[in-house]
Image (spheres, helix red, strand yellow):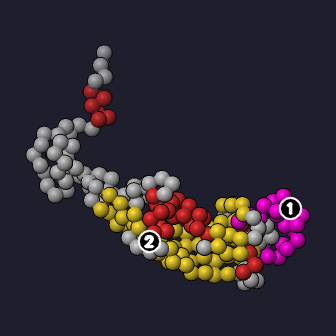
Amino acid sequence: MVVTVDQIREGGLSLDETLSESFLAHALAEVKDTGFRPDGPALLHVKLQKTASGVLLRGSTEVTVHTPCRRCLADVHLRVPVSFTLNLVSRAALADPKQAGADDDQSERAGSFDLERADEELFDGKSIDLDPLVREQVLLALPMHAVCREDCKGLCGSCGQNLNEGECGCARAQVDPRLAALKNIKLN
Ligand SMILES: [Zn+2]
Ligand SMILES: [Zn+2]
C-alpha cells in the first residue's frame, strides 16, 4: 500500500490495513525461507505523522504463524507481535538541513522522544510504500526458531520416533558431546 505525504493531515493519518495471507506468506519465504508460514491474514494498524525531515511511521500488528518444532518437527503455532517506529527521512531534507528546520513545530508534535529512538529509513519525500517496510518488520519480529514446548525431547536419531510420545528402545548415547570431548583429554 502506498501513502502519499499529501494525505497526511495536521493530526496525522491513521490507517488499518489487512495483511493478506499471501502477502505474509511471501514476506516469510521470499528473500530467505524463514520456515514460518502464516495461519491467516493479520490486521495492521499504522499511524503516520509529518516531521521536520519527513514522516514518522508507527505500526503494530500481530501475525499468527506456524513452523516445525526445531527438535521434533511437530507443527508449532505462535503469535508474533510486531510493533515498530520508523523515522522516514526525505532525501531532500537530508541534503538540505536548512529546509528541514523550517517546520520545527511539526517535529515537536511527532514527539522528539520517538524520533530519537526510531530507526531511520530514507524515502523520496513524496510517497511511502508500506509493503516492503512492513515485510521487513515482520521478519525482524520473528523468533530465530520455535519449539513445541521447552522440554521437547525431539526425535530418536536412529528410528525417528517422537520421544515426546514415548521411548523407542533404541540404544542412544546419552553422553553430551561436550562431555565426550572432555573424556578424551589425557590427564598427566
Ligand atoms: Zn517438539
Ligand atoms: Zn529409536
45, 7: nearer the viewer: 7
The residue at which mark 2 appears reads as 21
Residue 78 position in % (x across, y down): 38, 67
Q: Which quadrant is home to the C terminus?
A: top left
Q: Which residues are magenta?
A: 88-107
Give the overall secondary structure of the magenta segment.
helix
The answer to which quarter of the image holds residue 88 is: bottom right
Look at 10% across and 46% down and name the residue there. Answer: 169
Answer left or right for 155 relative to 135.
Answer: left
The residue carrying mark 1 has its beta carbon less than 8 Å from ligand 1: no
Q: Residues within 10 Å of mark 2 (few under 14, many from 20)?
A: some
Answer left or right for 62 relative to 167.
Answer: right
Look at 55% across and 78% down and name the residue there. Answer: 17
Amino acid at pointer 1? Pro
In reply to whether residue 101 is colored magenta, the answer given is: yes
Amino acid at pointer 2? Glu
Residue 76 position in % (x across, y down): 32, 63
**Contact, CB < 8 Å: mark 1 with mark 2?**
no
Residue with the most extreme top position? 188
Asked whether the viewer can see residue 137, the reply is: no
The residue carrying mark 2 has its beta carbon less than 8 Å from ligand 1: no
Q: Which quadrant is home to the N terminus?
A: bottom right
Helix, strand or loop at label 2? It is helix
152, 59: nearer the viewer: 59
The residue at which mark 1 appears reads as 97
Answer left or right for 5 relative to 66.
Answer: right
